[in-house]
Amino acid sequence: MFEAFGSQSVAWLEGHLQATAVDLGYDVSTQGAGFVQADGATA
C-alpha cells in the first residue's frame, strides 16, 4: 500500500483498505470491515 500510494495519509490508506474489504455476511461488530484484499486495494 505504501509503495503504491505513498503520498497518501495513513487515514486514507486505512479507509481504502476498509472500502475494498470483502463483506463476509456478518454484522459489523463481528466482521469489522470484512476480509481485507490487499492485492485489490493496490489495483
Image (cartoon, rainbow, N blue to C red):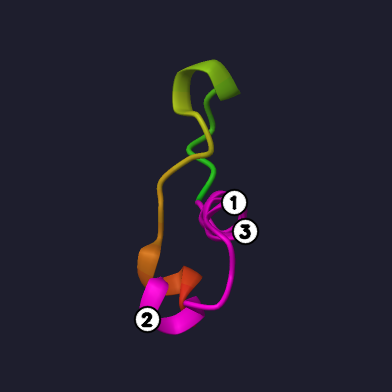
Q: Is residue 12 visible?
A: yes
Magenta stretch, residue numbers: 1-21
Residue 11's tag is 1
Q: How many marks?
A: 3
Q: Is residue 25 left or right of residue 2?
A: right
Question: How far is disc 1 from disc 2 in space, using C-alphas?
Answer: 16 Å
Q: Is residue 27 visible?
A: no
**Badge 2 element:** helix
**Badge 1 element:** helix
Residue 28 point in image, percent of width and height: 58, 24
Residue highlighted by disc 3: 12
Question: 5 above or below 28?
Answer: below
Q: Name which of mark 2 and mark 3 comes first in the sequence.
A: 2
Circle 2: residue type:
Glu
Residue lying at 53% horizontally and 51% vertically, measured from the top left = 14
Residue lying at 52% horizontally and 25% vertically, measured from the top left = 26
Residue lying at 55% horizontally and 49% vertically, measured from the top left = 18
| Quadrant of the snapshot with the N terminus | bottom left
**Badge 3 element:** helix
Check if mark 1's residue and mark 3's residue have beta carbons within 8 Å.
yes
Residue highlighted by disc 2: 3
Q: Residues within 10 Å of mark 1 (few under 14, many from 20)?
A: few
Residue 21 point in image, percent of width and height: 51, 52
Circle 3: residue type:
Trp
